[in-house]
Image: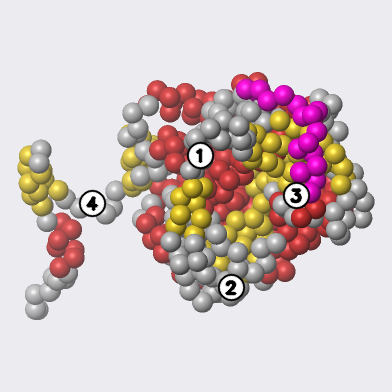
Amino acid sequence: MGERKRPVKTAVAAASEELMVVQTMGGRMQVRWDETAQATPHGQLVFFAEFLAAAGVFDRWVDACPLHYTSPNASGKRDVLGTLMLGVLAGSRRYAHIAGVRGDAVAAQALGLRGIVSEDSVRRALKAMAAESSEPWMREALMHSVRDALDRPWVLDLDATIKPLYGRQEGAEVGYNPHKPGRPSHVLHTFWVGNLRLVLDAVLTSGKQHTSRHGKAPLQRLLDELGDKAPALVRGDCGYGNEDMLDICEQRGLPYLFRLRQTKNVKRLIERLFRREDWTRASEATQGWQAIEDSIRLVGWSQARRVVVLRRRMKHDMALTARQDDGQLVLALPHDGVEDNAQLWEYTVLVTNAAYDIAAIGQLYRDRCDCENGFDELKNQWGWGGFSTQDMHRSQITARAVALVYNWWSWYVRAANPGARREALTSRPLLLAAVGRATSHAGQTTLYLTPMHAETGLIKTMVANVHAAIRHVRNAAEQLPRLDRWAALLRYICQRIVGQSALATPPPALAAPG
């Protein structure tokens, strides 16, 4: 009989078994590849997975998913959604970045997945969902992630952000794009829970549909879905201070606060009010702003409405520039002796029907700027500006999916640190990153964590806070089997937030109308 031939090792297999000697700046080190070990760079994901499991929200999201395959070899919808969520948590901005977590078997086990699927599988799965079924599925999931926390007075912030595009995607149109003029884009009309910085809904439209009228129908639908959880105030910038938005709020009896555009009639109002002497006093508490109120009926308005004008004197050294006909830039400095007599003001005109004292209106509107921080975090730290496909349908799904994972992670971080909010840039290194090595014996898995962060003691304290929240929910569920665990968890976190931080609660003006 002939001798059995041994299998020939490939070059890759041979290289993986070869011991490598590396001369580093700290000395010689021996390196060997180990592709069989159960390890993860996101070791603390197990605590977040426990958080989601205790509340049941991830299972609820998966069960309601309208994805259905006919092939028995297709990936399960839990594997698809778990892979997408893991990619978002890891900071992916494109589908191709999901390849960076393909070998994370520890994370797959923690999330109850059979395995991490490829980025192509995720793209194909999202394409297989019909728009008429995926739309209500994602909207309901986003609403469920926040709604049970809206028992206290809260502010609904309206805003839109531009998502620049670099291909020939559906809806890629050249519209309003202040940062990249002339660049095709999509627009995300977003509805925020003010101060808590949570997303209630995000509607993707083409680049030319950036005005507030394209957010009118989604706003009405959102207010219908909120029911008895209606906001104590609806707030927006100058793009929303028009008859359509004002009429929606007035018909529903909702207080509103919007900024007005500087039209000719508004400028005439400012000129008239500047002559009055009954402006409020500027103080450190108002950051130097003075206020006065009046009423006005602008063109297109059905009635006269209350307006509040804010002004603040600009005291810093300034210079004016102008461009001549030949294109040269001319610098104009104040003449000697003139700057002491002249006064330069910045001003803002707000329209409102809220029954609050005029002194509270200015700060109430300035708090709206926190929306910009939310947009900055979602676009730069959560990949809201990415995950683009040729069709708008999948881009809409991923926009809401990113917002949903962002909401879950925000609640998890607030459970860990009720006293202050942390953006992903600081919360991921604290509460997600750790080298994890898993071992299995006798049917039991042990995960050894090695944190790389300097604040190891703080990390353990934050994880203990999360476990306290989970124990609270589990103890309550034992006594009340039909308890909504997610609602109970949100109420517990909100109580901790209110007790330790005033930053996450609505402004005091909402609790005590003037």
Residue beneath disc 2 = 173
Q: Amino acid at mark 2?
A: Glu
The reply to whether residue 392 is visible in this rendering is no
The residue that label 3 is drawn on is: 267
Q: Which residues are magenta?
A: 267-285
Mark 2: give few (<14), some (14-19) or many (20+) Cα within 10 Å.
many
Direction from residue 425 to residue 172 in the image, left or right:
right
How far apart marks 2 and 3 lie (CA) works out to 33 Å
Determine whether 464 is above or below 338 in the image. above
The spot of residue 259 in percent (x, y) is 73, 46
- Foreground tag (1 vs 3): 1
Residue 460 at x, y = what percent? 44, 26
Q: Magenta stretch: dominant SS? A: loop
Q: Is residue 276 magenta?
A: yes
Q: Report which quarter residue 14 is drawn in.
A: bottom left
| Proximity of marks 2 and 3: CB atoms separated by less than 8 Å | no
Which of the two labelled residues, at mark 4 and mark 2, occupies the earlier sequence position? 4
Q: Between 234 and 394, which is closer to the camera in this rendering?
A: 234
Horizontal relation, residue 200 to residue 318: left or right: right
Counting labels gives 4
Badge 1 crowding class, 10 Å Cα cut-off, few under 14, some 14 to 19, many 20 or more, is few
Kindly report the distance in space between the C-alpha atoms of the residues bearing marks 3 and 4: 71 Å
Secondary element at image label 4: loop
Q: Which residue is mark 4?
A: 34
* Residue at x 71%, y 55% (from the top left corner): 239
Mark closest to the chain's N terminus, 1 or 3? 3
Judged from the image, the secondary structure of the residue bearing numbered disc 2 is loop
- How far separated are the C-alphas under marks 1 and 3? 27 Å
Query: Disc 2 vs disc 3: which is toward the camera?
Result: 3
Type of amino acid at the residue the image marks with label 3 = Lys
